[in-house]
Amino acid sequence: MTPYLVSIDLGTTNTVLAYAAPGAQEVELFTIEQLVAPGEVAGQPLLPSNRYHPAEGELAAGELQLPWLLPDVAGRGEG
């Protein structure tokens, strides 16, 4: 497992997550998947630091039911 240095900025306007491998010259911003338009999800480097309340009828019944399946980010086959 490769270790990473991680920094989280919990700002009042936006939240940002950055990471770098030890000794690396470059710092990468982690993209966070989020709702960017009605029915559209995309990865963005800034996550607004607020609570979103969907409009009535915006989400299908059961769409927010837990557990949510997570993408296989680290290649471990876990979800």
Image: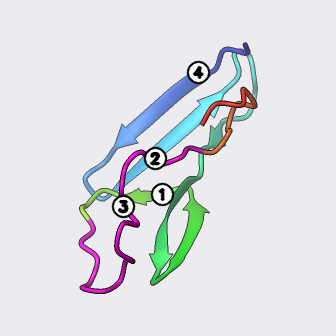
User: Is 58 covered by the magenta stretch?
Assistant: yes
* Contact (Cβ within 8 Å) of mark 3 with mark 2: no
Q: Which of the marked residues, 1 or 3, is nearer the chain's N terminus?
A: 1
Mark number for residue 1?
none
For the point 28% across and 76% down, the residue is: 54
SS assignment at label 3: loop
Residue 23 drawn at (x, y percent): 74, 16
The residue that disc 4 covers is 5
Asked whether disc 1 touches disc 4, contact meaning CB atoms under 8 Å apart, the reply is no
- Callout 1–callout 2 Cβ contact below 8 Å: yes
- Which of the numbered marks, if any, corresponds to residue 16? 2
Q: Identify the residue shown where x is 75% and y is 28%.
A: 25
The mark closer to the camera, 1 or 3, is 3
What's the distance in space between the residues labelled 1 and 3, CA to CA? 22 Å
Near mark 3 (Cα within 10 A), the count class, few <14, some 14-19 or many ≥20, is few
Q: Secondary structure at mark 2?
A: strand
Residue at horizontal 48 percent and vertical 57 percent from the top: 46
Q: Which residue is mark 3?
A: 64
Start-end of magenta stretch: 52-70
How much space separates mark 3 and mark 4, taking CA atoms?
32 Å
Instruction: From this view, report whether residue 37 is shown above or below residue 68.
Output: below
Asked if disc 1 and disc 3 are in contact, CB closer than 8 Å, the reply is no
Instruction: Determine which residue is flagged by label 1.
Output: 46
Question: What's the CA distance linking mark 2 and mark 4?
Answer: 14 Å
Query: Dot 1: what SS?
Result: loop
Q: Earlier in the sequence, mark 1 or mark 4?
A: 4
Q: Indicate whether 1 appears above or below 57.
A: above
Three-letter amino acid code at the position of disc 2: Val
| Quadrant where the C terminus is found in the figure | top right
